[in-house]
Amino acid sequence: MISVAEALDRLFSLASPLDVEEVPLRNAGGRVLARPVEAQRDQPPFAASAMDGYGVAEAAPGQRFSVIGEAAAGRAFTGSVGGGEAVRIFTGAPIPDGVKTVVIQEDVDRDGDVITITERLGPGDNIRPYGNDFRKGLRIDAPRVLGPQDIALLAAMNIANVPVTRRPKVAIISTGDELVMPGEDPGPDQIIASNTFGLYVLMQQLGADPRLLPIARDTEASLRTIFGMVDDADLVVTIGGASVGDHDLVANVAADMGLQSAFHKVAMRPGKPLMSGRFGKAMMVGLPGNPVSAMVCGHVFLAPVIRAMLGLGAAAAPRETLRLAAPIGENGPREHYMRARLCREGVTVFDRQDSALLSVLGSADALAVRPPHDPARAAGDEIEVIRL
Ligand code: AMP
Ligand code: MG
């Protein structure tokens, strides 16, 4: 048996960053910036008023000015402003020549075209200096997952098309004579394919482009047919049929169809059987079928593989160290990813850890990671967790 870290290393050796494509800015949210980009202009491109008010050369309480024009956002005042003169100015308008300060409208009494500055006059010139936000050439480094704030900044930088890493195409294949799709009418000996959909959404959330292939039945012919539909996937994920039972055919059929196979027993709970290798132009990962095992392996193995393909580096799922809210017993010989819940007091590990219990996984928001042979732990002891 190999360790989780070793299994991950072998997966990373198969997963390389995908190529770069340009997408329109509005489609770049959640995508991974693939190359650094630079601002195409200075922002703001002129000194601008930060408030609605009056632009003057110098301001003191009691001073009077005659209003000689108006400057609004997108409509500059082109003349220049001398002593005793003021320009009505609005937020975002370019500061006219001669204006050194903007008196906010609340600090002014207006009578026709004459204004008088009141005793209230506040501090500050209410001017946003030229280039105060950023200068041309400001660089945003890659890789970076682009969020809404990044998109706003890229827009201000006048970047209309963004170089991003192509989304990994993931073909998901469920296997088993007992499986039907949600919404179908299962026979008495059938169950609904579940982790299939959990993994689909996990892939989507990671920024991949998943596709559900039809359920493969536990025959060589059916598996061959479904493998034949893989098309141009970057990653093929099979679920189930990965142990060594009479009906576990995935490894054999995949090998027959050219999988450069590496079948691993990984020293982890839940999980254990894990298959990986090159499959044509794609990479293949075979997951165990048990619903919780498949989901945990999705977080522990598939998520890092997708991040590597997106160019975000080869790193295990991030862990943080928290404190136990309640004691737990000793761990066995395999690394254990225990379903747990986080609260203010710390981490509570659920009592029921069977790898078929999706209801327990559904109540969990973290996996508490126990090293092999970890002794019993008391409340208050530190434990590593992966957030779900
Ligand atoms: P297997 O790895 O094929 O032996 O499956 C192990 C267990 O997981 C069996 O109880 C299967 O019925 C169940 N199982 C396999 N695939 C799925 C799936 N896609 N959704 C839900 N349960 C599954
Ligand atoms: Mg099966």
Image (cartoon, rainbow, N blue to C red):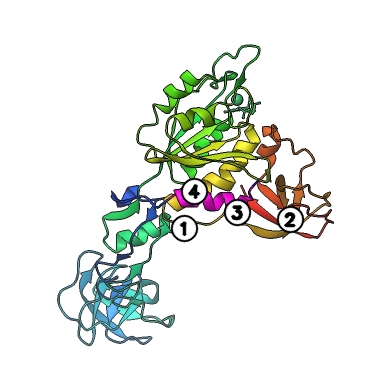
| Position of the N terminus by quadrant | top right
Snapshot quadrant of residue 111: bottom left
Give percent across and percent down for residue 132: 34, 76
Question: For the residue marked with disc 1, what is the amino acid?
Answer: Gly
In this view of the protein, which residue sits in the foreground, 234 or 89?
234
From the viewer's perspective, is 6 left or right of 162? right
Q: Residue at x 47, y 47 (%)?
A: 306
Of the two numbered discs 2 and 1 on the same chain, state the one appearing first in sequence.
Answer: 1
* Badge number at residue 344: 2
Question: For the residue marked with disc 3, what is the amino acid?
Answer: Ala
In this view of the protein, which residue sits in the foreground, 255 or 53?
255
Return the residue at label 3: 5
Of the two numbered discs 2 and 3 on the same chain, state the one appearing first in sequence.
Answer: 3
The relative height of residue 94 versus residue 17 in the rendered view (above or below) is below
Mark 2, mark 1: which one is toward the viewer?
1
Give percent across and percent down for residue 343: 73, 52
Question: For the residue marked with disc 4, what is the amino acid?
Answer: Val
Return the residue at label 1: 313
Give percent across and percent down for residue 102: 32, 78
Of the two numbered discs 3 and 1 on the same chain, state the one appearing first in sequence.
Answer: 3
* Badge number at residue 248: none
From the viewer's perspective, is 379 left or right of 92? right
Of the two numbered discs 4 and 3 on the same chain, state the one appearing first in sequence.
Answer: 3
SS for dot 1? loop
The relative height of residue 68 versus residue 228 in the rendered view (above or below) is below
Give percent across and percent down for residue 223: 48, 23
In this view of the protein, which residue sits in the foreground, 331 or 156?
331
Ligand 2 image-quadrant field: top right
